[in-house]
Amino acid sequence: MIKFHPNTQLLEQHVLGALPASLSVAISAHLELCDDCCDTVAALEQRIGEQTFTDDAGEELTGPQQLLDAQMSAMLSDITADTDVDDFAIQSAKQISVGDRNITLPRALSHVGMSRFVQAGKLARSRLELDEGSIRTSLLYIAPGGTIPEHTHTGFELTLLLDGTFTDEEGEYQPGDFIWLDHKHDHTPYTEQGCLCLAVVNSALHFNKGLSKLLNPIGELIY
């Protein structure tokens, strides 16, 4: 069961189209896995749609605006009544092979280009072509028995678990969990059976304990 979700503010910004593409894609991928957030987004779309078609005073559109709205409704009715329309193809989901797994990705990632996986020990990363300024988006695979030593975040880190499970100090995560962390969080992810995550970050991880400081180049790899 999915226990971690985008907050309402993020979902509202997603509906408004105000998020960077990387975050919007991550939320779209989460929505494919989470019925609860789909219901929330549907309610937000209805509310925002109603607000769009009212004036600043909250009154229904009148006069020329009302005429334009009626014309739009008539046009949409004609379109939906037309049975002579081209079929559209449902986008097929992309599959990847990493480790010993074949994994089907959410359809939100179907048109996103990605690099080959680069491996460092039990960690492998594929960069997605969604970079925007300091924001980096990747697929991260941790092999069975793999861990990322305790670290903090100098920016934000969004992790959407796509396959497998992992644990940290907060508990166990399942596919679909949407985990948002920042500089206030330290954690030590560990996976017994291996996992694949979609990661969106805007700064490198920082290892800050003992010998793990030597692993800060891995933090750059993840970033």
Image (cartoon, rainbow, N blue to C red):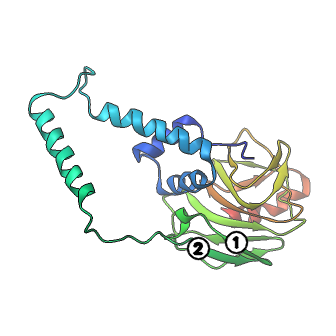
Residue depicted at 87% across the width and 50% down the height: 209
Q: Is residue 10 visible to us here?
A: no
Q: Amino acid at mark 1?
A: Ile
* Total number of numbered discs in the rendering: 2
In percent of width and height, residue 207 lies at: 80, 54
Secondary structure beneath dot 2 equals loop
Report which residue position mark 2 lands on.
94
Residue depicted at 58% across the width and 73% down the height: 94
Question: Closer to the camera, 45 or 5?
Answer: 45
Pick whichever of labels 2 and 1 is earlier in the sequence: 2
In percent of width and height, residue 41 lies at: 50, 41
Question: Closer to the camera, 7 or 40?
Answer: 40
In percent of width and height, residue 149 lies at: 85, 56
Secondary structure beneath dot 1 equals strand
Q: Is residue 44 found left or right of 182 in the rendered image?
A: left
Report which residue position mark 1 lands on.
103
Q: Callout 2 environment at 10 Å: few (<14), some (14 to 19), or many (20+)?
A: some
Q: Quadrant of the C terminus?
A: bottom right
Q: Are marks 2 and 1 in contact (CB under 8 Å)?
A: no
Q: Is residue 63 found left or right of 12 in the rendered image?
A: left
Q: Callout 1 environment at 10 Å: few (<14), some (14 to 19), or many (20+)?
A: some
Q: Is residue 161 found left or right of 78 in the rendered image?
A: right
